[in-house]
């Protein structure tokens, strides 16, 4: 049980520094730190490490910010250029489903007639109707898969992108 309390205290110490904790959790942690020297030492060590990290100076190349902004703008432009194509795909799918719903009774009767005239089992022509109904979704899925394949960056032999 004591290990569970220490584990909870360590979790709350880290959570308090990163995202904050509720008032009840803060009250429990304060009480626990007053009673447990091991967890209090751990909290003090974390506070000291954070202070040390804040004073640490990291040098970065001068042009890093400009390069980063350029890449972000380039990616935003790529996404904007792709936007009309996506609208067209969704509009075409919507129109296809509306047309499918409007023509479904006629296709059903047509497939039923063909099935009975040829002696085809009912299951077969009914499955044909299901495939006809699902065809727009299958085409949309194929388009999405092809688009997803184009977006993946090629990897180099060295492992970098």
Image (cartoon, grey):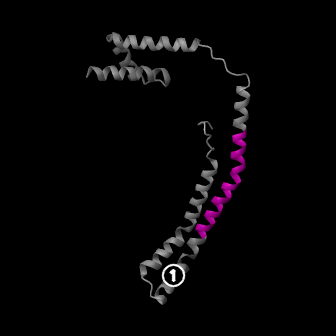
Is residue 47 toward the left or the right of residue 96 in the image?
Answer: left
**Residue at 56% across, 59% down:** 141
Residue 93 falls within the magenta-colored stretch:
yes
**Residues drawn in magenta:** 74-98
Above/below status of 85 relative to 45: below
Circle 1 SS class: helix
Q: Is residue 147 left or right of residue 132?
A: right
- Where residue 36 appears, as percent x and y from the top left, is 32, 12
Q: Residue at x 46, y 87 (%)?
A: 116
Is residue 90 a member of the stretch shown in magenta?
yes
On the rendered image, what quadrant is the N terminus found in? top left
Label 1, residues with CA under 10 Å away: few <14, some 14-19, many ≥20: some
Question: Which residue ends up furthest to the front in the rendered image?
Answer: 157
Residue at figure coordinates x 70%, y 26% from the top left: 64
Q: Main secondary structure of the magenta part?
A: helix
Residue 125 x, y percent position in the rendering: 47, 79
Foreground residue among 159 and 51? 159
Q: Give the residue displayed 40% in from the left and 20% down from the top.
A: 26
Q: Is residue 46 above or below residue 148?
A: above
**Where residue 127 sits in the image (x, y, percent)?**
46, 74
Q: Which residue is mark 1?
A: 111
Left or right of residue 88, residue 51 in this image: left
Where is 159 relative to 89, above or below? Answer: above
């Amino acid at each position: 049980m004591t290990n569970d309390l220490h584990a909870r205290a360590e979790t709350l110490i880290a959570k308090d520094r990163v995202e904050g904790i509720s008032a009840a959790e803060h009250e429990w942690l304060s009480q626990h730190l007053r009673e447990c020297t091991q967890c209090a030492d751990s909290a003090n060590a974390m506070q000291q490490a954070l202070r040390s990290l804040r004073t640490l100076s990291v040098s970065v190349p001068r042009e890093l910010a400009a390069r980063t902004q350029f890449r972000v703008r380039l990616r935003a432009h790529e996404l904007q250029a792709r936007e009309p194509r996506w609208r067209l795909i969704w509009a075409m799918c919507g129109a296809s489903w509306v047309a499918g719903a409007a023509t479904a009774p006629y296709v059903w009767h047509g497939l039923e007639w063909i099935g009975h005239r040829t002696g085809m089992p009912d299951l077969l022509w009914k499955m044909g109707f299901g495939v006809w109904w699902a065809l727009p979704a299958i085409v949309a899925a194929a388009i999405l898969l092809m688009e997803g394949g184009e977006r993946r960056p090629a990897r180099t032999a060295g492992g970098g992108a």
